[in-house]
Amino acid sequence: MKISVVTAVYNRVDMIRAAIDSVQAQTYANIEHVIQDGGSRDATLEIVRAAANDKTVVISERDHGLYDAINRGIRNTTGDVVGLMHSDDMFAGPDVLAKVAAAFKDPAVDGVYGDLQYVAADNPSRIIRHWRSKGYTPEKLKQGWMPPHPTLYLRRHVFDTYGLYDTNFQIAADYDAVLRYLAHGKISLAYIPDVLVKMRVGGESNRSLERIMQKSREDLKAIRRNGVGGIGVLTQKNLRKLVQFFVKDTTGQ
């Protein structure tokens, strides 16, 4: 089974190498890393090309934002399973994709996810929040639940059947897509109770009060359009984030 990892990147000269290194350090051999560069104006592309190996596919072209870049990257993959590695994230260890592949040995599983750690941008060993996602049941969608998107891997047929990311969203297209796959597609998920990805804090959706408000508006739009509920679901979703600051990592990673 081939696993494709997609990285959309634009002007990330300071962090892209760590993301690439974490993919190349994986012990699972049958992978490809599609790096979709949006026409970076700094030295990002030079770093990407210098770090590329025989499992790396590099495309550089102008796009219309993050989700358009991700969609382009997914279309350029050839794997049976596809997941994302954001340009400022990294795998929690070298065996992450091996664990993902093992979970997909069950043919009934459409998607696999695990836990996520938010870490300091300048010190990935310092944990800010721990997102322990736990197992999925359909009822949880109405309680504001979603899997940590950077840990989610899906079989190709999920994208082929239910579509890619809606680029009308600027911040919450990932939440909308997850709700579409789960609420409408009713896909089957398997949970890996380990930290799979370390995500640096300071992302696009949280960089200002205006962006946080826009994120909430887009989340509510996604909730309503996918028939999951309304403002109550959004409230529960946001409250779940507060709990993450008090959860201890017991995985040893």
Image (cartoon, rainbow, N blue to C red):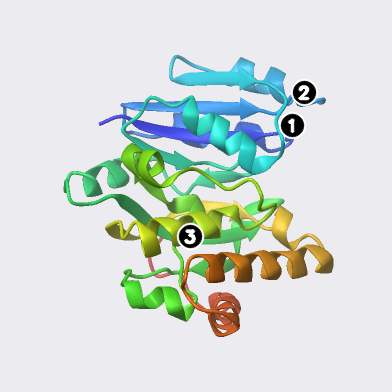
Image spot of residue 93 (x, y percent): 42, 45
> Does residue 161 appear left or right of residue 144 in this picture?
left
Element marked by disc 1: loop
Disc 2 or 3, which lies upstream in sequence? 2
Mark 1 and mark 3: span between their CA atoms?
A: 25 Å
Query: Is residue 202 visible in this depiction of the protein?
Result: no
For label 3, count other residues whose C-alpha is less than 10 Å away and answer few (under 14), some (14-19) or many (20+).
many
Element marked by disc 2: loop
In the foreground, 8 or 196: 8
In the foreground, 64 or 31: 64
Q: Which one is closest to the eye, mark 1 or mark 3?
A: 3
Disc 1 or 2, which lies upstream in sequence? 1
Query: Is residue 200 visible in this depiction of the protein?
Result: yes
Kind of residue sitting beneath label 1 = Val
Image spot of residue 238 (x, y percent): 60, 77
Kind of residue sitting beneath label 3 = Pro
Label ID, residue 13? 1
| Residue receiving disc 2 | 43
| Residue receiving disc 3 | 148
